[in-house]
Image (cartoon, rainbow, N blue to C red):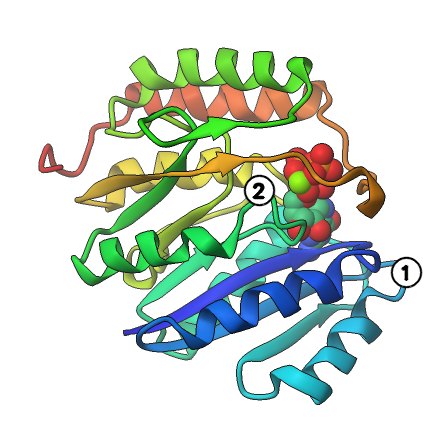
Amino acid sequence: MRVCIIIPMYNEEVGAHECLSVIVPYLRALPGENTVLVVEDGSKDATRKIVEDFISTWGSGQVTLVAHERNQGYGAALRTGIRYAIDRGYDYAVFMDSDLTNHPRDLPQFYEKMGQGYDYIKATRYSKGGKVEGVPWQRRIVSWAGNTLAGPAFRIPISDFTNGFRAVKVSVLAKMALTERSFPIIVEELWQAKKYARTFCEVPYVLTSRAEARGRTSFSYGWPTYKAYLKYVWKAFWTKRLSKRI
Ligand SMILES: Nc1nc2c(ncn2[C@@H]2O[C@H](COP(=O)(O)OP(=O)(O)OP(=O)(O)O)[C@@H](O)[C@H]2O)c(=O)[nH]1
Ligand SMILES: [Mg+2]
């Protein structure tokens, strides 16, 4: 099994080195052939240099960097990563954030499900063993509202629609036509998964908050993001599932 772990980064100079140095030892303990692909996206800080230095010192062979000259957004960065995984014949793509709020300690659970051949494997805060820690209440409410709407609209066996920690079969990603340049790509991909993925499953995880010391990216959740999310919830409502098999 060949797995490409796609990590988008934008202005992450504070946490980029820690992110990679925490993830790489986990990889060495996992089965199969694993690559971490950092998609650096025109950061205005030293993120790119830090990743390059990490690769030349520690990660050569295990960590790869693709860089956009100008910032194109989270969604565009994921699409670059997906293209990379398709072109190089990977079996699965795993998507993780770089601020360690998606922790590599959860990777073995994903690998177990990948080994069982699931098409779409999603981390969930809302099943046994999952929870949210230290996340501001405003975010919790947005997530609760998003999931309350998405559940009955999507009608797929997923309980957490708004987090980005997931593993998807590359052959399924190859069928999708993803267009979003920013965070709504997460829900757009789920809508497409309803059409193209036969099997779904979840792994519980604990979502923590980005450590204050690492700072925040400039991204904010505004009305255009919510509108785009709602668009895919609406589309999913009218879309038939490929198969009822779970
Ligand atoms: N390539 C790329 N990555 C991005 C962009 N915006 C955010 N990211 C990355 O996407 C991941 C998630 O972004 P976060 O800023 O952590 O989003 P969040 O978790 O909703 O918000 P906070 O953690 O509270 O700031 C991180 O790895 C970011 O570096 C972007 O424009 N391009
Ligand atoms: Mg974050």
Q: Residue at x 67, y 49 (%)?
A: 99
- Looking at numbered disc 2 in the image, what kind of residue is underneath it? Glu
Seen at 48% across and 62% down, the residue is 82
Q: Locate the C terminus and report the quarter of the image it occupies.
A: top left
Residue 165 position (above or below residue 86): above
Q: Is residue 143 left or right of residue 9?
A: left
Of 146 and 28, the residue lying toward us: 28
Q: The residue tagged with tag 1: helix, strand or loop? A: loop
Could you say where residue 20 lies in the image, as x and y percent from the top left?
Answer: 64, 67
Binning the other alpha carbons within 10 Å of mark 1 as few (below 14), some (14 to 19) or many (20 upward) gives few
Q: Quadrant of ligand 2?
A: top right
Image coordinates for residue 170, horizontal then vertical, percent? 34, 62
- Viewer can see residue 73: no
| Residue wearing tag 2 | 180
| Label 2 residue SS | loop
For the residue pair 234 and 145, the one nearer the viewer reads as: 145
Image x and y of residue 54, in percent: 72, 78
**How many angstroms separate mark 2 from mark 1 (CA)?**
25 Å
Using residue 175 as the reference point, say whether residue 10 is left or right of it. right
Q: Are marks 2 and 1 in contact (CB under 8 Å)?
A: no
Q: Residue shown at 31%/69% (left/top)?
A: 91
Is residue 210 visible from the viewing direction of this image?
yes
Quadrant of the rendered structure where residue 190 is?
A: top left
Residue 164 in the image: x percent, y percent?
Answer: 51, 41
Q: Say what amino acid the circle numbered 1 marks.
A: Asp
Instruction: Give the residue pinned by disc 1.
Output: 45
Mark 1 C-beta closer than 8 Å to ligand 1: no
In the image, is residue 242 above or below residue 143?
below
